[in-house]
Image: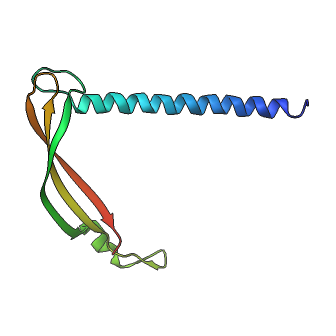
Amino acid sequence: MDLIVPPLLILATFGIIFAVGVGLIYIVLLIYDREARKCPKCHRRGAGSVTHTDEIHSRTFIDQAMMSSMARTDKKWVKPLRITETIYEDQFECKYCHHTWSKTVTERQHNPS
């Protein structure tokens, strides 16, 4: 019994530290989300809800920084990185004052060649 208690106390301590860390990350992300959906007219946080999303533009290209790395590095051939960039426009509406506004978001996806 004396050999089991110290490791259990250490495990419980790390479990509590982990739970507090996850809780703090959740709270920070919740605050960030509410701030991102803040109404520009009435300034209430978290008031905006997405009513419509449009894809404005999409393009696929090879990353220019990777083009120079076509030479051998570390005895391996490095393949260029194909990137798909998509631009979206989100339409928001405030649930309190019914003000509408839009935000543009750029999404980048790295695709293997």
Left or right of 50, for residue 20: right
Specify the quadrant of the image occupied by residue 12.
top right
Q: In this view, does 5 lie above or below 59?
A: above
User: Considering the image in quadrants, where does the N terminus appear?
Assistant: top right
Q: Which residue is pictured at 72% across the width and 34% down the height? A: 11
Residue 43 percent location from the top left of the image: 16, 21
Q: Is residue 63 above or below residue 95?
A: below
Residue 19 percent location from the top left of the image: 57, 31
Q: Which residue is pictured at 21% across the width and 69% down the height? A: 61
Q: In this view, does 10 lie above or below 58?
A: above
User: Considering the image in quadrants, where does the C terminus appear?
Assistant: bottom left
Left or right of 4, for residue 61: left
Residue 21 percent location from the top left of the image: 52, 31
Q: Nearer the viewer, residue 43 or 83?
A: 43
Specify the quadrant of the image occupied by residue 8.
top right
Q: Nearer the viewer, residue 46 or 3?
A: 46
